[in-house]
């Protein structure tokens, strides 16, 4: 049997009767034309799925789908809707390290990607057109490859037909993309991510990739909106839902990149740049080292840590213990891991009294002025700020999926008159706009990061 025959057999096996889940198969909804023509609530493929809003009435996220595609299970799926609630695009993660790490290895990834391509070839009734893309415009070689299925401009509308019949007209535009890594003189797929973008016919971009949100890229205005109450705010910063992963840094950077019109860079790609761990998150050192070079060299963006805001934990312990002694409160002990000789930061944080922590950290007028000046300059210039914080001390409304520890979010506005900041968390609908008193914001801050265009780009 030829290699092509083996792949076809794999696809046939995956699509065998009984393989589909109770929620149905996305391929069937595409073939019969229902996927793009019905309200998503009426689609059998979503029946029983635990979907949640990324942006209310705009984009849904299904974290662990029960539905299949050509009989094969899929990962995190984002569905973008039109004003009538009908899907216009879907981004389906067939593999990513954050949600599915360990299920596919570097050795098995090439075969995994080829099998996915074979299933799509069967679905669309023809091979996909090869394309490649450079996410690094400064390098001569591409680092993304893919297959694209474009609908014909004059193709008739898709009509229901038997699943075994080869379609006579395209019923969707689609692109299958994966990362590539140079090994010797040839490119080979890398076990980083494999994603499928599906959109209404006629919407596939020139580079091969379908638009992430089913339309033109979203870019931020040059200046913020100013409300009568004194609020100065950047509105419309795209939302990303990090889910249950420790991808707050990757998701935050992805949102800033989308704000600058680079929404083809998702959190899974950025997580690879900064070595994010889905369980433990991202180290500040990895961000400064990896992200700074990538953003500057590839996109003409300067990534820098703003001065005068960082939390020096060991230095603060000294300040805290002096105050605790005066108030007859327990002292904080510093624990060092005997194997790594690294200070156990979380064990220190858990010893702080929340009230005393907030008073000491938020009661410094110089730090408060410095923090507000950083925020004001950035927001007035149309740049959201990446904001690293320590959760578990200041009041949060609504409640957060993460109750304690280090976290990264976005500052998108401020109100100097009221002494507050406007911020957003990457946890989907309900977390897109929140406010916090400036004093508390300063208290829980561990760092502020700016991502800004260079002057010569």
Image: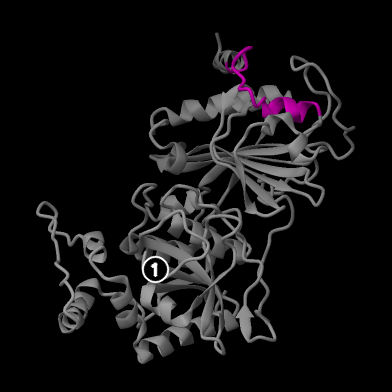
238 sits left or right of 451 in the view = right
Q: Which residues are magenta?
A: 14-32
Residue 354 position, x and y percent, is: 32, 71
Quadrant including the N terminus? top right
Q: How is the image coloured?
A: one colour
> For residue 403, which quarter of the picture?
bottom left
36 sits left or right of 411 in the view = right
> Is 175 a magenta residue?
no
- Residue 172 visible in this rendered orientation of the protein: no
Residue at coordinates 36% horizontally, 79% vertically from top-left? 309
Q: Nearer the viewer, residue 324 or 199?
A: 324
> Is 19 a magenta residue?
yes
Q: Secondary structure at mark 1?
A: strand
Q: Nearer the viewer, residue 254 or 178?
A: 254
Residue 195 position, x and y percent, is: 57, 39
Residue at coordinates 68% horizontally, 83% vertically from top-left? 227
- Residue 194 visible in this rendered orientation of the protein: yes
Q: Which residue is mark 1?
A: 389
Residue 86 position, x and y percent, is: 78, 43
Quadrant including the C terminus? bottom right
213 sits left or right of 294 in the view = right
Q: Nearer the viewer, residue 133 or 316?
A: 316
> For residue 330, which quarter of the picture?
bottom left
Q: Residue furthest top?
A: 1
Secondary structure predominantly adopted by residues drawn in magenta:
loop
Residue 374 position, x and y percent, is: 47, 83
Residue at coordinates 17% horizontally, 84% vertically from top-left? 326
From what the image shows, is residue 95 above or below residue 358? above
């Amino acid at each position: 049997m030829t290699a092509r025959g083996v792949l076809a057999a794999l696809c046939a096996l995956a699509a065998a009767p009984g393989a589909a889940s109770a929620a149905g198969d996305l391929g069937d909804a595409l073939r019969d034309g229902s996927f793009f023509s019905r309200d998503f609530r009426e689609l059998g493929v979503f029946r029983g799925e635990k979907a949640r809003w990324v942006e209310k009435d705009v984009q849904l996220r299904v974290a662990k789908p029960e539905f299949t595609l050509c009989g094969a299970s899929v990962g995190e799926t984002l569905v973008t809707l039109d004003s009538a609630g009908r899907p216009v695009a879907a981004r389906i993660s067939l593999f990513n390290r954050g949600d599915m790490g360990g299920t596919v290895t570097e050795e098995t990834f090439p075969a995994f990607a080829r099998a996915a391509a074979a299933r799509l070839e069967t679905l669309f009734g023809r091979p996909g057109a090869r394309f490649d893309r450079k996410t690094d415009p400064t390098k001569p070689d591409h680092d993304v490859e893919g297959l694209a299925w474009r609908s014909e401009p004059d193709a008739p509308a898709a009509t229901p037909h038997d699943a075994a019949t080869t379609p006579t007209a395209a019923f969707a535009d689609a692109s299958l993309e994966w990362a590539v890594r140079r090994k010797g003189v040839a490119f080979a797929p890398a076990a980083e991510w494999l994603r499928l973008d599906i959109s209404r016919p006629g919407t596939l971009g020139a580079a091969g990739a379908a638009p992430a949100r089913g339309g033109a890229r979203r870019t931020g205005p040059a200046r913020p909106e100013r409300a009568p109450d004194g609020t100065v705010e950047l509105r419309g910063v795209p939302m990303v839902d990090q889910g249950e992963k420790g991808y707050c840094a990757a998701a935050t950077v992805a949102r800033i990149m989308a704000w600058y019109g680079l929404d083809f860079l998702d959190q899974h790609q950025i997580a690879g740049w900064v070595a994010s761990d889905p369980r433990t998150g991202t180290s500040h050192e990895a961000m400064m080292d990896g992200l700074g070079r990538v953003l500057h060299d590839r996109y003409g963006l300067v990534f820098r840590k703003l001065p005068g805001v960082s939390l020096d934990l060991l230095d603060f312990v000294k300040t805290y213990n002096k105050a605790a002694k005066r108030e007859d409160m327990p002292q904080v002990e510093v624990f060092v891991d005997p194997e790594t000789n690294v200070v156990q930061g979380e064990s220190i944080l858990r010893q702080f009294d929340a009230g005393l922590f907030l008073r000491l950290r938020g009661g410094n007028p110089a730090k408060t002025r410095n923090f507000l000046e950083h925020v004001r300059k950035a927001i007035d210039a149309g740049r959201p700020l990446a904001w690293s914080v320590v959760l578990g001390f200041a009041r949060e409304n609504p409640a957060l999926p993460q109750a304690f520890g280090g976290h990264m979010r976005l500052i998108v506005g401020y109100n100097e008159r009221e002494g507050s900041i406007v911020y957003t968390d990457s946890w989907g609908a309900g977390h897109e706009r929140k406010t916090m008193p400036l004093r508390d914001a300063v208290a829980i801050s561990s760092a502020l990061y700016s991502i800004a265009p260079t002057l010569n780009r």
